[in-house]
């Protein structure tokens, strides 16, 4: 019997989550390490430890989800977001370290793959997933295939001349500057001072505080504008919204965002476009990395 399991690794800017994953997306064991994020050597050490903690003879391959732009032909990490991994062949590193097939995918593409194969988008031929976390990422499934390229959905302009974007981005009014966890932190601080953050905003909205509800309406408008544009570009059957901030505000924001999106969308999406929460929660990235691992196991890499 061939090894039926893989290790998926969700490599984040602050933590590395690994898990033993089966073909149905069940996570059979998991491990979390803080990602030091200060040097390439530290990150690789943390990554190796995260795999080492779980690897046994049932494991036949490794899938890595990385917040990075990848060379599509080789899987080489060209430029990572929030990680000191530039122009580095991560797959080759893990292959030689563990002697197993290894595949690498962008982390939000991996999350979209998981939501499509096993989560809220199961059985559909097209969808767009948006991940609202510290930043905003996303993945696109079209014609029954995951788009494997670099889709920076968070950096769509939704407000010309709007607030400056963050990190390496020099644009303004991007979705990430208006509808991410960091955007919510900024909005809360503008309303209530430096002590406030996105949690304050969500708590106060739940308590019915007018400024908080108004601010989340603006978040929903921005998100809806982006989703309406995505609907007009790709005509997806479904829009899935996940990520830590996305989950925290799903019941407050997704309904109004769907309404706002339908106002921008062409027929028939102006009446049919659906915006739903992700269903795999924080495990989407991990499970998606596992699915990528199965691609390596099956010889697709
Ligand atoms: Zn941007």
Image (cartoon, rainbow, N blue to C red):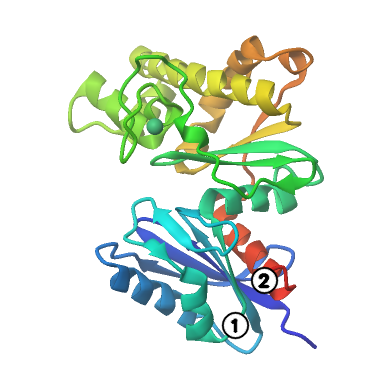
At horizontal 76% and vertical 31% (from top left) the residue drawn is: 237
The reply to whether residue 93 is visible in this rendering is yes
* First in residue order: circle 1 vs circle 2: 1
Foreground: 2 or 151? 151
Q: Residues within 10 Å of mark 2 (few under 14, many from 20)?
A: many
**Location of residue 56 with respect to 279 vertically, above or below:** below
Q: Residues within 10 Å of mark 1 (few under 14, many from 20)?
A: some
Where is the N terminus found, in terms of image quarters?
A: bottom right
At horizontal 28% and vertical 28% (from top left) the residue drawn is: 186
**Residue 142, picture quadrant:** top right
Ligand 1, by image quadrant, is top left
Q: Secondary structure at mark 2?
A: helix
Q: CA distance from mark 1 to mark 2?
A: 9 Å
At horizontal 36% and vertical 55% (from top left) the residue drawn is: 13
Q: Which mark is residue 292?
A: none
Q: Position of residue 226 (x, y in %)?
A: 55, 23
Q: Is there a contact, CB below 8 Å, between mark 1 and mark 2?
A: yes
Q: Secondary structure at mark 1?
A: loop
Q: Which mark is residue 100?
A: 1
Foreground: 151 or 291? 151
Q: Position of residue 4 (x, y in %)?
A: 73, 79
Q: Residue farthest to the top?
A: 263
Query: Is 279 left or right of 267, judged from the image as shown?
Result: left
**Location of residue 193 with respect to 99 vertically, above or below:** above
Q: Position of residue 216 (x, y in %)?
A: 43, 20
- According to the picture, the residue beneath numbered tag 2 turns out to be 296
Callout 2: CB less than 8 Å from ligand 1: no
């Amino acid at each position: 019997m061939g090894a039926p399991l893989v290790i998926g690794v969700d490599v984040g800017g602050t933590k590395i989550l690994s898990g033993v994953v089966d073909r149905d997306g069940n996570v059979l064991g998991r491990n979390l390490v803080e990602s030091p994020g200060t040097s390439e050597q530290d990150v690789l050490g943390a990554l190796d430890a995260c795999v080492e903690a779980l690897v046994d003879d049932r494991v036949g391959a490794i899938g890595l989800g990385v917040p990075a732009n990848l060379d599509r032909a080789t899987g080489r990490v060209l430029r990572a977001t929030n990680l000191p991994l530039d122009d580095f062949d991560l797959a080759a590193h893990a292959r030689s370290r563990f002697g197993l097939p290894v595949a690498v995918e962008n982390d939000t593409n991996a999350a979209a793959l998981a939501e499509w194969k096993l989560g809220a988008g199961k059985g559909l031929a097209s969808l767009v997933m948006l991940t609202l976390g510290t930043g905003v990422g996303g993945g696109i499934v079209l014609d029954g295939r995951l788009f494997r390229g670099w889709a920076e959905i968070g950096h769509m302009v939704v407000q010309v001349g709007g607030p400056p974007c963050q990190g390496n981005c020099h644009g303004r009014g991007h979705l990430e500057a208006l509808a991410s966890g960091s955007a919510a932190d900024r909005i809360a601080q503008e309303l209530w001072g430096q002590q406030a953050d996105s949690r304050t905003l969500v708590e106060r909205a739940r308590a019915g505080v007018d400024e908080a509800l108004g601010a989340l309406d603006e978040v929903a408008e921005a998100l809806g504008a982006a989703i309406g544009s995505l609907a007009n570009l790709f005509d997806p059957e479904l829009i899935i919204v996940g990520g830590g901030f996305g989950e925290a505000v799903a019941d407050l924001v997704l309904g109004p965002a769907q309404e706002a999106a339908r106002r921008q969308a062409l027929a028939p999406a102006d009446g049919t476009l659906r915006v739903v929460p992700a269903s795999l929660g924080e495990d989407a990235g991990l499970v998606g990395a596992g699915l990528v691992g199965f691609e390596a196991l099956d010889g697709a890499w």
